[in-house]
Image (cartoon, rainbow, N blue to C red):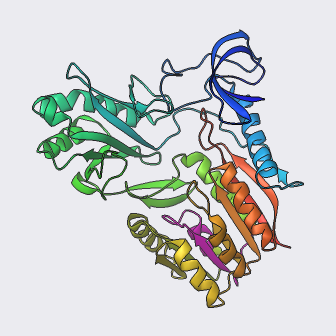
Amino acid sequence: MAVFAMWGCPGDEAEVEITEVPGRFARGLVREVITPSPDRVTALCPHFGSCGGCQLQHITYPAQLRHKTAIVREALSHIGGLSGIEVAETWGMEEPWRYRSRVEYHAQIGEAGDLYFGFTRHHSHDIFPLEQCALQHPLSERVRRALLELLPRIAQGGEERAALLDAECLVSFASGQAIVTLVCDGRPSFLASLAEALIQEVEGVVGVSAARARGRLASHRSPSSVVLGRRYLTEQLGEAPYRVSPDSFFQVNPQQAARMVALVHEWAQVGPRDGVLDLYSGVGTFLLPLARAAHHGVGIEANQAALADARANLRQWQLSNVTVYEGKVEHLLPRLAQRKWRSDVIVLDPPRKGCGSLVCTAAAKLEPRRIILVSCHPAALARDLKYLGEHGYTPSRVQPVDMFPQTWHVEAVCLCSRA
């Protein structure tokens, strides 16, 4: 029986406590390592094992990359039923720390009335109080420490402080600037004073926004509004500038994102007569570089903040051959297929759940020369490739990219051609 043992390292001999047997496999926790794997190391972060942010810090980085390659290969084989596909070794980072441009710190008031920020524990909604995080941009960590100091001075009493549920920080690696979004229960009176104090006391903070929580989870929130300062930042992928707002989706690892954009451009082989369709186009991460080499480009995006950023980026890039439509891909794409619309190259960059059968079927009906699928979940990638294969699009090359070092997440770019 397979046993999925949390905190284990492949090659360990360990004592494992079985916690669940849901079927033909079991889950457990490593309680004692008897003989450690050659790939086992001491985690850099003292919170490792308690905080839910990382899962692989106890494994050497080269071994992390090997295991992520194996995860992608296994998903394609066992879930997608795909074989004979070239899966390259995972692209790693030279320095796999301090790579994140975006973070969401959860606020909590302790029993003694003290304030702390942290991340949720594994498989729990409990918040673990942070003292440090080695994955975040240093400016994000300075913002967290400043909030711990400023909020008790500005907010009157624990009840008022408890109105702050989340603090989100978006940092531009290109400019070294940040925008902080305060997610609150309602609109507390301390917002303006806290925003002014953050901008004055934390060098690099150029804007503070606020959003209202919807329901009990702060991650379900309203669109943000500016309290003080700037509304957006400029990030660069290679030499290319992108406007990014706090409410937009943008890859959290700019260094690896730049490599991924270059790879998509290389595999797309776009020419001056080609039409490009980018689904889930966001701020134009893939669409803009491809459209610059194509006859025309079309994007579909549902997030209004991302649409505003994409249109601003079009003006900044001086592209007049691009149209971006607002709406859900699963609603708009079948309409394009019904109208016999044609595209030479399609890029799919869906959320974690993947594209699904409807989107893959509609994309295939447009009869592109190539489909490039960008996925952050190997199981969803395997399912989507299976759907595309049923409509004549064969995956030929897969390149895993380590966008999230020290965690079990892995991104992958896949090239599909019409059979």
Q: Residue at x 14, y 33 (%)?
A: 159
- Residue 280 lies in the magenta stretch: yes
Quadrant of residue 245 in the image? bottom left
Q: Residue furthest right?
A: 84
Left or right of 412 in this view: 206 = left
Q: Quadrant of the C terminus?
A: bottom right
Q: Quadrant of the N terminus?
A: top right
Q: Residue furthest top?
A: 34
Q: Residue at x 56, y 69 (%)?
A: 288
Left or right of 315 in this view: 224 = left
How far across and how far down the image is residue 397, in percent? 81, 57
Q: Is residue 143 visible?
A: no
| Viewer-proximal residue among 170 and 117 | 117
Magenta span of residues: 268-292
How far across and how far down the image is residue 163, in percent? 20, 40
| Viewer-proximal residue among 403 and 383 | 383
Left or right of 109 in this view: 355 = right
Q: Is residue 5 above or below residue 82?
A: above
Q: Is residue 408 above or below residue 250?
A: above
Q: Is residue 397 above or below residue 335?
A: above
Q: How many marks?
A: 0
Quadrant of residue 104 in the image? top left
| Viewer-proximal residue among 64 and 28 | 28
Q: Is residue 380 visible?
A: yes
How far across and how far down the image is residue 271, in percent? 72, 78
How far across and how far down the image is residue 404, in percent? 59, 40
Q: Residue at x 24, y 52 (%)?
A: 229
Left or right of 264 in this view: 153 = left
